[in-house]
Amino acid sequence: MRNSWNYSLYKKWRKYIDFASILKLRQCFLHGINDEEHVTFKFKSDMIRDIVIRGGDTDIATLCEIFDGEVYAGIFKYVKNCSYVIDLGANIGLASAFFAINCPNANICAVEPDTENFLILEKNLKLLAANGRAKNINAAVWGRKTNLILKNKGGHANSFEFGEVLPGESYVDAIDGLTIEDIIGFSGFETVDVLKIDIEGAEIELFSRDTSWLKNIRCVAIEFHGDSRKISDFDNLIVAAGFEIAEENDHTTIVLNKYMG
């Protein structure tokens, strides 16, 4: 049984990481990772070499979700030539790394509000950025340009709730809230092949204002949180913008712009 599990682990991960890293990953599964520890895996890609995850359960779960579960792989059935990706809620950069590895020509703009996550993201996308193929923004996407404050941090490193800083309030740890138009402008992308959205409920804010920017988006891959799909009226909004639902599962809903092919 153990030999079967070992081979299955090797078979699943060999296309992404080297053998020593597979052994390291095996140790993580068997014994866990101390909360204070950082573990580095060696990837085989020219653009993504070292991926760092932190101790605890969250980062390794996300690593497995993206590279073992390949929750975003369905996108490639519909988007054959993926050159421009915006990753909203990039966390430590694992989804961005997945796109960079599987789309050799991809240019990526990764947006992450949490400072601790962002520091790891910059390490993980360092080589990609050095080659001019990644731009990283330490900010949150919001319905309008404003300052935001963390209202609640959930029990894991990718769960956040933000609120706007009110007039007269001042916080040393406030972060930038940027519109999607701001982010697209910073990216320099005239069109976006994939807009990945995993922003812990802020999708309500994203879709609450003018959505004319959708005309320049080829594919949206979104993870909803709570009742955000219903509250944002996403299904009606997206159809009105010329999109159709191509695929959905427990993790991600993929919608395609009918006018961009």
Image: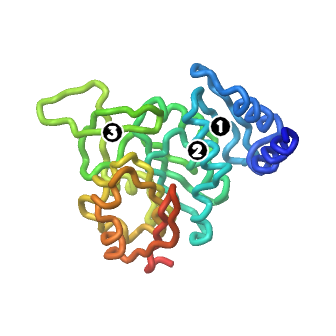
Element under label 2?
Answer: helix
* The one of 143 and 33 positioned closer to us in this rendering: 33
**Where residue 188 sits: x, y (%)?**
44, 57
Which mark's residue is nearer the viewer, 1 or 3? 3
Residue count near mark 1 (Cα–Cα under 10 Å), binned few <14, some 14–19, many ≥20: many
Marks 1 and 3, how far apart in space?
A: 26 Å
* The one of 11 and 149 positioned closer to us in this rendering: 11
Residue drawn at x 25%, y 47% is 145
Q: Indicate the amino acid at tag 2.
A: Leu
Circles 1 and 2, Cβ within 8 Å, touching? The answer is yes
Q: Indicate the amino acid at tag 3.
A: Glu
**Where residue 70 sits: x, y (%)?**
63, 54
Element under label 3?
Answer: strand
Residue drawn at x 83%, y 41% is 6
**Can you name the residue that lies furthest to the left here?**
168
Q: How is the image coloured?
A: rainbow
Q: Quadrant of the N terminus?
A: top right
Nearest to N terminus: mark 1 or mark 3: 1
**Where residue 120 sits: x, y (%)?**
54, 33
The residue singled out by tag 1 in the image is 51
The residue singled out by tag 2 in the image is 94
